Image (cartoon, rainbow, N blue to C red):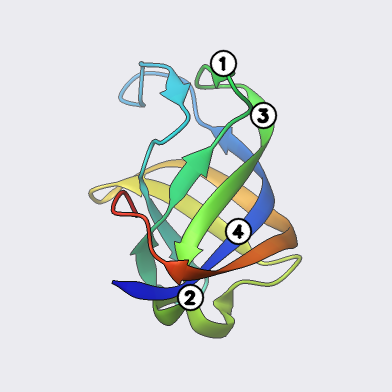
């Protein structure tokens, strides 16, 4: 399948505490992202090689979204929450669009 992938840089924090995600966040993790208009889509979190982080920590990460699903919702300053199912596990803010990738869409998105 071909299409456009929008890669963003975002500030992201996963909540810590009872009932929250307990396991580490690794590169390739694909939660759902909910934007302010209640639109939900999946995205793939990309970390620096070998980087991981624990719930409760704040990190600057890259996230890949398929453009056909996110449309004009992705722009610097946009806020989102991160979900697994209906549970909000974290929140973030888009800092900038770093890349628009044209061509075959990787299967993991």
Marks 1 and 2, Cα distance to the nearest angstrom?
A: 27 Å
- Crowding at label 1, few (<14), some or many (≥20) Cα neighbours within 10 Å? few
Q: Quadrant of the N terminus?
A: bottom left
Res 50 label: 1
Q: Decide: is 50 above or below 75.
A: above
Res 7 label: 4
Q: Name the residue rendered at 23%, 48% in the picture.
A: 85
Whichever of callouts 3 and 1 sits on the residue coming sooner in the sequence is 1
Q: Name the residue rendered at 60%, 58% in the picture.
A: 7
Whichever of callouts 1 and 2 sits on the residue coming sooner in the sequence is 1
- Mark 1 residue element: loop
Instruction: Give the mark toward the camera: 3 or 1.
Output: 1
Instruction: Give the mark toward the camera: 3 or 2.
Output: 2
- Mark 2 residue element: helix
Kindly indicate whether the residue at mark 1 contacts the one at mark 3 (C-beta within 8 angstroms): no
Residue 19 x %, y % = 30, 25
In the picture of the structure, the residue carrying the numbered disc 3 is 58
Whichever of callouts 4 and 1 sits on the residue coming sooner in the sequence is 4
- Crowding at label 4, few (<14), some or many (≥20) Cα neighbours within 10 Å? many
């Amino acid at each position: 399948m071909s299409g456009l992938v929008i890669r963003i840089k975002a500030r992201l924090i996963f909540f810590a505490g009872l009932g929250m995600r307990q396991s580490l966040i690794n590169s390739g993790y694909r939660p759902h992202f909910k934007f302010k208009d209640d639109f939900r889509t999946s995205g793939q979190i990309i970390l620096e090689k070998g980087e991981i982080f624990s719930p409760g920590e704040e990190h600057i990460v890259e996230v890949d979204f398929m453009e056909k699903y996110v449309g004009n919702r992705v722009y610097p300053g946009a806020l989102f929450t991160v979900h697994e199912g209906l549970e909000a596990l974290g929140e973030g803010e888009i800092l900038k669009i770093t890349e628009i990738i044209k061509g075959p869409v990787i299967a993991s998105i």
